[in-house]
Image: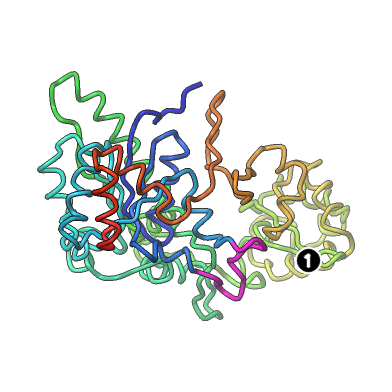
């Protein structure tokens, strides 16, 4: 079956993680994605060797961040500050269906690539702009990335308890979320453009998101509570101070943890837990006889569950919980997932033709095979792309000699 975006061309002027991921998802959907990079250097992730103490260089010397976030693309090197580079850029945009960028407005102005500029010239262009802290007001040109945006959006606050120093959960999760949102918006705009043919309008336009907006979106409940109930707020509590002991983690005899996922303490749920733990004494304990009593004796419940879960392994407890319809999960490490037969059966892992293993796009299109090309070498498609734009071999050679490409 044909991939949904086959036949469409996307010009990718992005750096780091968030913008490149948006373009990668469009490539996964079948679009031809042409990534513009700095001559001689390329995207910053081509040299990002480590993060949070972990090496980001594979055993065969591939830079993992670049490989993961730039699959299925063509790389063109181009100096957009040079007049000759602008001439090439103009031809690229003229033939594009969409343009994706996460550069700041001041840089886009220097590149003559602001939304107002490109959309005035190309009304059918879908312009996808990924911002840091927003596209309007005083934050529009403030530099930002995943860590800063998580702090500004309140994510660090809600994910740490009052006893903790606010911390950054590693892995570029805000980048992945915002990049996914940007790709979603661009795809929707491309569909809208096709439907606009019926009324004769150009159908292109600007699609924006930001790290801040995306991280606020993922905290819809966390932010919705104080918006609608002033004075109330959600924040991670230390497990011994939690008011929801059946939505917590417990250490098991093999040193691993099981996570329970039920926010209730009513009689039916409590009865399930008693049966799972094979602890009838909990049912008869005066402190736990009613939901109201259980609510005021949460520390005692946690202590009792700590002792009981410590008596068996994670696997044993997961089996028992699932047999009694109690929501639960082992607390996995990322490296556990590739060894989990149930996860592997979901076909969420893939390998590029360059040998890089990765998690597939977060959707499955029945009957559609997603492409598996690895990230391109720097400038690998420069000559072929320029030739397709009408540049002669001699013109391309002159551009190379001038370090424009």
- Taking 210 as reference, is 203 left or right? left
Q: Is residue 251 placed above or below 203 in the rendered structure?
A: below
**Residue pushed farthest top?**
198
Task: Name the residue rendered at 89%, 63% in the picture.
Answer: 311
The stretch of residues the image draws in magenta is: 48-61
In the displayed structure image, the side of residue 392 where residue 27 appears, left or right: right
* Residue at the farthest left position: 120
Q: Is residue 89 magenta?
A: no
Q: Main secondary structure of the magenta part?
A: loop
Q: Residues within 10 Å of mark 1 (few under 14, many from 20)?
A: many
Residue 302 vertical placement versus 372 (above, below): below
Residue 293 appears anywhere in the view: no
Instruction: Please state the horizontal and vertical placement of residue 323, each as a whole percent of the image.
Output: 81, 41
Is 7 or 251 nearer to us in this picture? 7
Q: Residue at x 34, y 32 (%)?
A: 8
> Which residue carries the number 1 mark?
251
Please tell me which residue is depicted at 64% across the width and 66% down the height of the picture.
296
Question: In terms of secondary structure, where does tag 1 sit?
Answer: strand
Q: Answer whether residue 54 is magenta in the image.
A: yes
Residue positioned most to the front: 394
Judging depth in this view, the residue of 250 and 205 nearest the camera is 205
Residue 405, how many percent across, how many down? 30, 57
Name the quadrant containing residue 347: top right
């Amino acid at each position: 079956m044909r991939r949904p975006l086959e036949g469409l061309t996307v010009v990718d002027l992005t750096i780091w993680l968030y913008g490149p991921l948006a373009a990668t998802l469009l490539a996964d959907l079948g679009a031809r994605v042409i990534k513009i990079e700095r001559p001689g250097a390329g995207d910053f992730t081509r040299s990002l060797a480590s993060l949070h103490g972990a090496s980001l260089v594979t055993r065969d010397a591939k830079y993992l961040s670049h490989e993961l976030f730039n699959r299925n693309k063509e790389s063109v090197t181009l100096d957009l500050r040079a007049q000759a580079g602008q001439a090439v850029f103009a031809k690229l945009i003229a033939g594009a269906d969409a343009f994706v960028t996460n550069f700041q407005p001041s840089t886009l102005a220097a590149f003559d690539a602001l939304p107002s500029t490109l959309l005035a010239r190309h009304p059918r262009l879908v312009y996808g702009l990924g911002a840091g802290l927003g596209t309007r007001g005083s934050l529009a040109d403030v530099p930002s990335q995943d860590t800063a945006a998580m702090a500004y959006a309140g994510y660090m606050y809600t994910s740490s308890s009052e006893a903790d120093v606010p911390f950054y959960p590693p892995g570029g999760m805000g980048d992945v979320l915002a990049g996914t949102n940007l790709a979603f918006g661009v795809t929707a705009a491309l569909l809208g453009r096709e439907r606009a043919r019926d009324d004769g309008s150009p159908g292109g336009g600007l699609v924006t998101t930001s790290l801040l907006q995306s991280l606020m979106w993922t905290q819809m409940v966390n932010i919705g509570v104080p918006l609608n109930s002033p004075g109330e707020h959600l924040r991670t509590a230390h497990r011994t101070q939690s008011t929801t002991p059946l939505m917590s983690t417990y250490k098991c005899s093999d040193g691993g943890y099981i996570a329970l996922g039920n926010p209730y303490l009513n009689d039916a749920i409590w009865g399930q837990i008693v049966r799972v733990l094979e602890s009838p004494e909990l049912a008869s304990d005066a402190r736990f006889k009613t939901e109201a009593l259980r609510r005021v004796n949460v520390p005692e419940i946690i202590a009792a569950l700590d002792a009981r879960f410590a008596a068996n392994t994670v696997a044993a407890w997961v089996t028992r919980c699932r047999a009694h319809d109690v929501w639960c999960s082992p607390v996995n490490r990322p490296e556990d997932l590739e060894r989990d037969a149930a996860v592997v059966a979901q076909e969420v892992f893939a390998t590029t033709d360059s040998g890089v293993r990765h998690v597939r796009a977060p959707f499955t299109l029945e009957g559609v095979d997603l492409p598996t090309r690895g990230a391109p070498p720097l400038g690998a498609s420069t000559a072929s792309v320029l030739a397709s734009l009408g540049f002669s071999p001699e013109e391309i050679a002159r551009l190379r000699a001038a370090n424009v490409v």
